[in-house]
Image: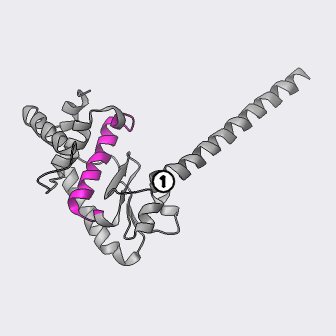
Amino acid sequence: MIVKNQYSKIIKISLYGFATLAVLILATLIWFKPIRVVFAHHLSLLHCEGNVCVDDPKSEPLATTLYHRALQETQDKVGAFHQQPTMVFCSTLECANTFGMEKAAAKAVGNWGLLVAPRGWKDFYITHELIHHRQAEEWGNIAMLTKPKWLVEGMAYTLSDDPRPTLSAPFQQWRAQFKLWHQQNPAPNIWLTTEKVK
């Protein structure tokens, strides 16, 4: 009888653990909408070809062109991707809101994928977010939260060739700080030098 009791305890604990995990995953999908990019290929509101997903199939040729152009530009500046990311291009606010885009033009969700809102269909926005994706690949998703903001955002604004001469605060300062740091720390492999920055 003691053996039976031990197994029933193990089964109960396992079931509680599984239920807790299921609730956490569901809560994450409900409250942290950008994570839905992970399931982009399975969402009925999207049409996906390869790594490019769109809410309007007519916009797929433009989205694919933007994706490949920005991908190449990013690789030229910060090296090859470990894995080419999935990118969701929203042509409507309804789609953007499904992914919790709020006011963002585009958003990298760690190294899991990228989202592009209707106003973000521009090379520099997409390249900016692809740089964040590469950062997450090289530094890890947790480090994206702990690295200095001037490094994370300054690198993305600078290397994406953002054409805006003046950015809102604090982004303008972060871009200037990164440019200065980058001039003082030239290296063929930017990831080796940025790894040391805490």
In the rendered image of this protein, does residue 2 appear above or below residue 18? Answer: above
Residue 115 position, x and y percent, is 37, 58
In the rendered image of this protein, does residue 78 appear above or below residue 89? Answer: above
Query: In percent of the image, x 47 and y 51: which residue is there?
Result: 35
In which quadrant is the C terminus drawn?
A: top left
In the picture of the structure, the residue carrying the numbered disc 1 is 33
Residue at the far front: name it: 169
Q: Residues within 10 Å of mark 1 (few under 14, many from 20)?
A: some
Nearest the viewer among 180 and 187 is 180
In the rendered image of this protein, does residue 134 appear above or below residue 63? Answer: above
Residue 131 position, x and y percent, is 26, 48
Residue 54 position, x and y percent, is 40, 69
Task: Give the secondary structure at mark 1.
Answer: helix
Query: In percent of the image, x 24 and y 43: which residue is there?
Result: 153
Query: In percent of the image, x 22 and y 61: which residue is there?
Result: 123
Residue range highlighted in magenta: 120-144
Residue 144 position, x and y percent, is 34, 37
Query: In percent of the image, x 41 and y 49: which residue is there?
Result: 112
Q: Could you tell whether 194 is left or right of 140 in the image?
A: left
Q: Is residue 57 visible?
A: yes
Q: Could you tell whether 93 is left or right of 61 in the image?
A: right
